Amino acid sequence: MPFPPGLAALLAPFCAPQAGPGPGPFQAVNQKGILAVADYLGITPAKAMILCLEHKIWPLRFARNRGIFTAAEQRRFLESHAAIIGCGGLGGHVATLLARAGVGAFTLCDFDVFDESNLNRQVLCSETNLGQSKAATAGKELARIASHTDIRIFPVKADPGTLAEILQGAEIVIDCLDSLEARRDVSAAADQAKVPFVHGAIAGEEGFVMVALPGKKSMELLYQGVALADEKGAELLLGVPTVTPAAIAALQARFALMVLAGREFGKTQLCHVDISGPSLEMLTL
């Protein structure tokens, strides 16, 4: 889209040159400038940021992403839609990380409410919101972090009867659940919708992160021979300490951003993390 007449003059008071990060200097526009553009053109703040990025003007809130991501990739994030299934230990971290990174639309699904046992590890849980919906709380926090985001809330179970509606419009599905049966249902629904699926699982000081592309049947391969009755065994034995969900969620968010940026994944990527060492293994299925 060409730069509308008068926009450069409008932006000038809100822009400042930046020496880095990334290759060479660039211009960054602050939040007041984004809102001024949105008001001038009668568009949403998200579309105003997209327009600026098309002309290599970075919203200041995303300037530190430059160097790792290009302006075109940052624009893709703003245009993308992530479905996060489970808004507790993993999902709370994943949602806030992706909102800060620039993802423009979210579907947040969780039927559960916060209780005291969540306080040690669930970043969105506080003493003041015990008993409140995890999905609704996540939506409020994302709106507080990034008011330009489009947010859909589903405080329901993710099962074969609800998943078609939950995943509608999503370009990536991120599994932050603690039930193998539900994970399998979500993986199958993502596969049917031909949407990449990012799986995360934790127990003790270890965890797995996997990027599964449509048609690969990666969850079936990873959990073949695992009975539903065994799924909670490791978590009940080892617990879920404070830092493990944060570490695994950061990797889930990282892989999700790579997918949304259009980076190629030729094979299923499986990452095993042991933070007690620490150690990290990259495997393929």
Image (cartoon, helix red, strand yellow):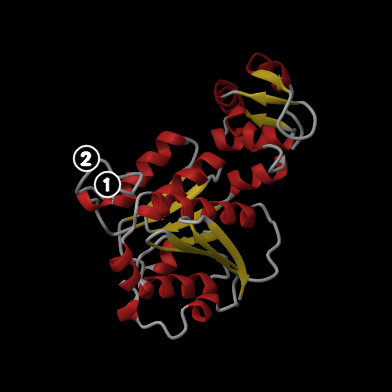
Residue 96 quadrant: top left
Task: From the image, tell me which residue sits under label 1.
Answer: 119
Using the rendered image of the protein, determine whether residue 115 is visible from the camera's viewpoint: no
Q: Is residue 270 left or right of residue 138?
A: right
Q: Position of residue 230 (x, y in %)?
A: 33, 78
Residue 161 quadrant: bottom left
Q: Could you tell me how far apart the alpha carbons at marks 1 and 2 are, in whole angstroms?
A: 8 Å
Using the rendered image of the protein, determine whether residue 227 is visible from the camera's viewpoint: yes
The C terminus, quarter of image: bottom right
Task: From the image, tell me which residue sits under label 2.
Answer: 127
Which of disc 2 and disc 1 is earlier in sequence? Answer: 1
Circles 1, 2 touching at the beta carbon (< 8 Å):
yes
- Frontmost residue, 240 versus 37: 240
> Farthest right residue?
24
Q: Position of residue 196 (x, y in %)?
A: 57, 65
Name the kind of residue labelled 2 in the image: Glu
For mark 2, does the 10 Å Cα neighbourhood hold few (<14), some (14 to 19), or many (20 or more) residues?
few
- Frontmost residue, 280 versus 142: 280
Please give the name of the residue rendered at 69% of the width and 43% of the height, measured from the top-left corner: 69
**Residue 265, relative to residue 104: is it above or below?**
below
The tally of labels here is: 2
Please give the name of the residue rendered at 43% of the width and 48% of the height, measured from the top-left corner: 93
Please give the name of the residue rendered at 32% of the width and 64% of the height, measured from the top-left corner: 238
Q: Position of residue 100 (x, y in %)?
A: 51, 39
